[in-house]
């Protein structure tokens, strides 16, 4: 891999769209030869190398040139390809594409024209390792995503619709997420319907990483036999949500916005059902869901048998402490517990009273951290309950905000 300073240099040489090719070649020579280049002589209005032997770039293996290009925005990749004596041009086979409307000063006409030409010029044979597409009210984006999956066998997709615009509808008629190559999908500011979730869950046998942010989820279930990390951040969930992911290692479901506004409460799902998470090592559920249900709680068989790190929010204190007690009771390997009591509204505070008959022994629990407001009056009761049931914890850290 190249050092960050090298990547910065490579990106910087194209800051001026009118840069002459000899300036680009000179900078690339500095990167690849450690700064030692031979003198050049001016010819006419341009400078050219004194000898073709000075061209150390064109002879490099294609994989090295592609590695260099992976640090660049797509338009710089196209410009750089003009330097190399290759046919077809290297940009047509670049394994990583970063197409961002911000790089076009938000000019949607130029952005659309460039992206359309880029995908048409690649043909159908060249595969993609990664596509990063940051769009803004460009309807054709759905066809570009579809082509990346269907024609170019893309392994990683990172799509963002500019958050200043309405959520982008992932039209299942134009985009098929059915792929045996997809490994990572990151979607921001989109609308995802059930049929799309079904494809991601059941027809992407290699999918391991799924991140959904600032989006609207219209599906009652996320289930996958391959998924290992799942992140749902600042999303509007319209249905009760069942999470059924047997190989999941990390689950994050959170909302980072203010916790006291009515809009915030509406944007959270009314119920999350956790099912088959026996491989999960890290679970983060600070979002104020109204209810969390647990499935397959077989006596004598802990549901979270691999869990070592747990982050929960105010909701876990509901129903006389029952959700938190359930987590601790079924997590024999749990080492770190964080409780984030981020509600300032008195009406939303859960009373701290242990239900009769609910006990837990967190034998492996080593560290407990409580995040709360400075004036949190429930803190002494909460600490007493935890210390009484987690015998190995001698001290509880409290962080206020």
Image (cartoon, rainbow, N blue to C red):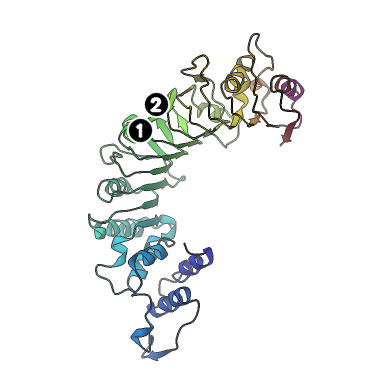
Q: Is residue 18 magenta?
A: no
Front position among marks 2 and 1: 1
Place of residue 308 in the rendered image (x, y in percent of width and height, measured from the top left):
58, 32
Q: Which range of residues does the magenta coloring cover? A: 373-384
Q: Which residue is mark 2?
A: 221
How busy is the neighbourhood of tag 1: few (under 14 within 10 Å), some, or many (20 plus)? many
Q: Is residue 56 left or right of residue 8?
A: left
Is the C terminus in the top left, top right, bottom left or bottom right quadrant? top right
- In this rendering, is residue 368 above or below 328? below
Q: Which residue is mark 1?
A: 201
Q: Earlier in the sequence, mark 2 or mark 1?
A: 1
- Quarter of the image for residue 67 reads bottom left
**What residue is rendered at 64% in x and 9% in y?**
357
- In this rendering, is residue 382 above or below 39? above
Q: Are marks 2 and 1 in contact (CB under 8 Å)?
A: yes
Place of residue 396 in the rendered image (x, y in percent of width and height, measured from the top left):
73, 30
- Front residue of 136/311: it is 311
- Quarter of the image for residue 239 reads top left
């Amino acid at each position: 891999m190249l050092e960050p300073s090298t990547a910065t240099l490579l990106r910087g040489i194209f800051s001026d769209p009118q840069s002459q090719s000899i300036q680009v070649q000179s900078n690339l020579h500095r990167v690849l030869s450690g700064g030692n280049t031979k003198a050049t002589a001016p010819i006419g209005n341009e400078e050219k190398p004194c000898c073709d032997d000075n061209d150390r770039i064109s002879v490099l293996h294609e994989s090295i040139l592609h590695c260099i290009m992976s640090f660049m925005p797509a338009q710089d990749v196209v410009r750089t390809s003009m330097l190399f004596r290759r046919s077809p041009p290297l940009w047509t086979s670049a394994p990583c594409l970063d197409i961002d409307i911000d790089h076009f000063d938000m000019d949607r006409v130029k952005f659309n024209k460039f992206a359309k030409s880029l995908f048409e010029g690649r043909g159908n044979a060249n595969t993609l390792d990664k596509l990063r597409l940051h769009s803004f009210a460009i309807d054709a984006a759905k066809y570009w995503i579809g082509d990346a999956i269907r024609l170019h066998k893309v392994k990683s997709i990172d799509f963002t619709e500019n958050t200043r615009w309405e959520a982008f509808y992932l039209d299942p008629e134009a985009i098929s997420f059915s792929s045996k190559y997809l490994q990572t999908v990151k979607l921001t500011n989109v609308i995802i319907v059930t049929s799309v979730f079904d494809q991601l869950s059941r027809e992407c046998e290699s999918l391991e990483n799924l991140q959904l942010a600032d989006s609207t989820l219209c599906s009652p279930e996320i289930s996958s036999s391959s998924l290992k990390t799942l992140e749902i951040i600042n999303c509007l969930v319209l249905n009760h949500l069942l999470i059924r992911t047997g190989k999941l290692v990390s689950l994050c479901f959170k909302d980072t916005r203010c916790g006291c506004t009515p809009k915030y409460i509406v944007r959270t799902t009314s119920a999350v059902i956790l099912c088959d998470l026996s491989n999960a090592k890290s679970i983060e559920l600070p979002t104020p869901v109204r209810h969390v249900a647990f499935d397959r709680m077989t006596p004598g068989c802990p549901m979270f048998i691999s869990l070592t790190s747990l982050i929960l929010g105010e909701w876990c204190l509901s129903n006389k402490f029952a959700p938190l007690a359930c987590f601790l009771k079924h997590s024999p390997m749990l080492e770190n517990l964080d409780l984030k009591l981020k509600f300032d509204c008195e009406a939303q505070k859960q009373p701290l009273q242990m239900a009769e008959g609910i006990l837990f022994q967190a034998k492996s629990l080593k560290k407990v951290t409580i995040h709360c407001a400075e004036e949190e009056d429930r803190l002494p009761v909460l600490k007493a309950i935890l210390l009484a049931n987690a015998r190995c914890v001698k001290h509880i850290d409290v962080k206020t905000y």
